[in-house]
Amino acid sequence: MSISVELAEDTAPTGTGAPWWRQAAVYQVYPRSFADANGDGVGDLRGILSHVDYLADLGIDAIWLSPFYPSALADGGYDVADYRDVDPRLGSLADFDELVTALHAAGIRIVIDIVPNHTSDLHAWFQEALAAGRGSAARDRYIFRDGTGPDGSLPPTDWVSMFGGSAWQRVADGQWYLHHFAVEQPDLNWGNPDVRADFVRTLRFWADRGVDGFRIDVAHMLTKDLREPLPTQAELERLPRDGQHPTIDRDDVHDIYAQWRAVFDSYDPPRTAVAEAWVDAARIPLYARPESLGQAFNFDLLLADFDAAQFRRIITDNLELAARSGSSSTWVLSNHDVVRHATRYGLPRPDRLDDGRPARRHGGDWLLSGGTEPVLDRDAGERRARAASLLLLGLPGSAYLYQGEELGLHEVAEIADGQRQDPTFFRSSGADTGRDGCRVPLPWTGGGASFGFGQGGSHLPQPAWFADRAVAAQEADPESTLALYRRALALRHQLQAAEELTWIETGRADVLRFARPNGWHVVTNFGAEPYPLAGSEPLLASSPAPAGTVPGETTVWLPPYANRLG
Ligand code: NOJ
């Protein structure tokens, strides 16, 4: 194992002198669906290696690699059987090292996923815990309890798993273990010193191999206060999320991250981390502080409509939150857990609860109908997605992009029940179709076996309409969404400035305009009526924009120079 290329502290030509991650464009690779080099229908590390030039041409600063570890795939790889190895179906540690070297040589950093809340039930520790029996040291690494009812045949509590059904599973000797996600994902006991020590070993294992940073899965749920009597589900839901909640967002989770921070900072350059923490907005800075993980995802745009007022509020609030933590903000429109944003924006707006959240999973009904009801306006969805993405890439902070969004991909609804993989589908008895539709292998070519994904088919079915969306087709089209992302990412490097923006009032509720400190302006027209723009020739536009106007549902970037004139 050797990493030959060390990247400079700040390779982004931003001139800001800030650490690379503060305003990086990070591209999420879901490895089983990116590219398949060995033709077994499942994407692999050599598949990614064969497309490093594509990633370099795209102009991203880093990839975030979703789990590639040995896994029975009960939850798309987020059920990890061995944290310090590569799934043999995806390659080997030697392939991983080669990938890191190739990415670094191309100026691209690599962030990997760490899944510390739960292991796979196939992890050696869990197998040991099953064999060792009740009261054993091996069981103490997980959360085992006796059941209730006269013979202990009822679960310890009525807690519900995030994927539906009971959060407890009974084992052969009658005890129950806690799993906040799938049955195959037993929660670890973070009160156990073995668990703490082993994750430090894992972080060092990958940092020593040249990994630049870590995305921390379910970062807000590791520590738990499980003193008896345990609350009911209803009580859990009522208890305040103030740092003392029994299972969610506890203050003491930051003791773990303080220890990890010491590990990250023992490297030169320091390794980075970003928290996946679904917590109240006011508590996000705790995860994003430099003493903790250093950055946290802001998921607000995943839940928002294509709407000027919502975008402005979310941007303002999150810049303020980031400033409070000393971190930079993050922006996300799509990832492997949600319906792709081109599709969300092409469907009617969801009904909303009083707190503004969608009443149901946006796109959920459409997926359940097999993509027929309500009617998806594909063109409008992609037009709005391009406008939103161009706005996002103009914001101060880090942009997290999800593979396929640069192709303007829509969610795939055409997946038969028998082909589904996501545990949310099975545990909800089909009431929720799950997340497979955004995890369908990428189309690289307009034809051929699995649209160029690999020689041996595709582990999730690809629809016929992928042909037009393929990389090869878009590379030949200067107006394609791929071409837009490439231009935007290249320009972003040149234009990037200090992490600030100033809102400029437009006189229209459906038009947002902001300026970065160097005079780079971003204007998004969320409405249908064109917005007149005097004196400025756009540098880039998300849809064809005649001079002097921002058409409906379009974002334009105005160069610093033109703004000085205008
Ligand atoms: C969050 C991940 O993004 C998701 O895909 C996974 O199912 C859960 N955490 C459980 O690990």
Image (cartoon, rainbow, N blue to C red):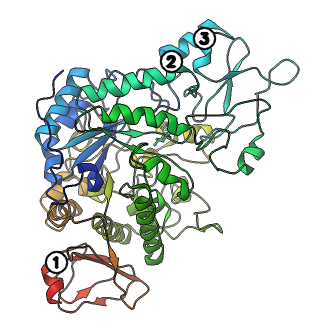
Report how far apart the C-alphas of labels 1 and 2 lie in the structure. Answer: 55 Å
* Picture layout, residue 114 above or below residue 355: above
Q: Is mark 3 within 8 Å of ligand 1?
A: no
Q: Is residue 103 visible?
A: yes
The first of marks 1 and 2 along the sequence is: 2
In this view, which residue lies farthest toward the top? 132
Pinpoint residue 198: horizontal percent, then vertical percent: 44, 20
Q: Which mark is residue 43?
A: none
Quarter of the image with the N terminus is: top left
Quarter of the image with the C terminus is: bottom left
The reply to whether callout 2 and callout 3 are in contact (CB within 8 Å) is no
Give the residue at mark 3.
137
Q: Which mark is residue 194?
A: 2
**Amino acid at pointer 3:** Ala
At numbered mark 1, what does the secondary structure look like: helix, strand or loop? helix
The first of marks 3 and 1 along the sequence is: 3
Pinpoint residue 85: horizontal percent, then vertical percent: 33, 21
The first of marks 2 and 3 along the sequence is: 3
Q: Residue at x 19, y 60 (%)?
A: 16
Left or right for 340, reference 428: left
Give the residue at mark 1.
560
Q: Residue at x 64, y 24 (%)?
A: 143
The reply to whether callout 1 and callout 2 are in contact (CB within 8 Å) is no
At numbered mark 2, what does the secondary structure look like: helix, strand or loop? helix
**Amino acid at pointer 2:** Asp
Report how far apart the C-alphas of labels 3 and 1 lie in the structure. Answer: 63 Å
Q: Residues within 10 Å of mark 3 (few under 14, many from 20)?
A: some
At numbered mark 3, what does the secondary structure look like: helix, strand or loop? loop
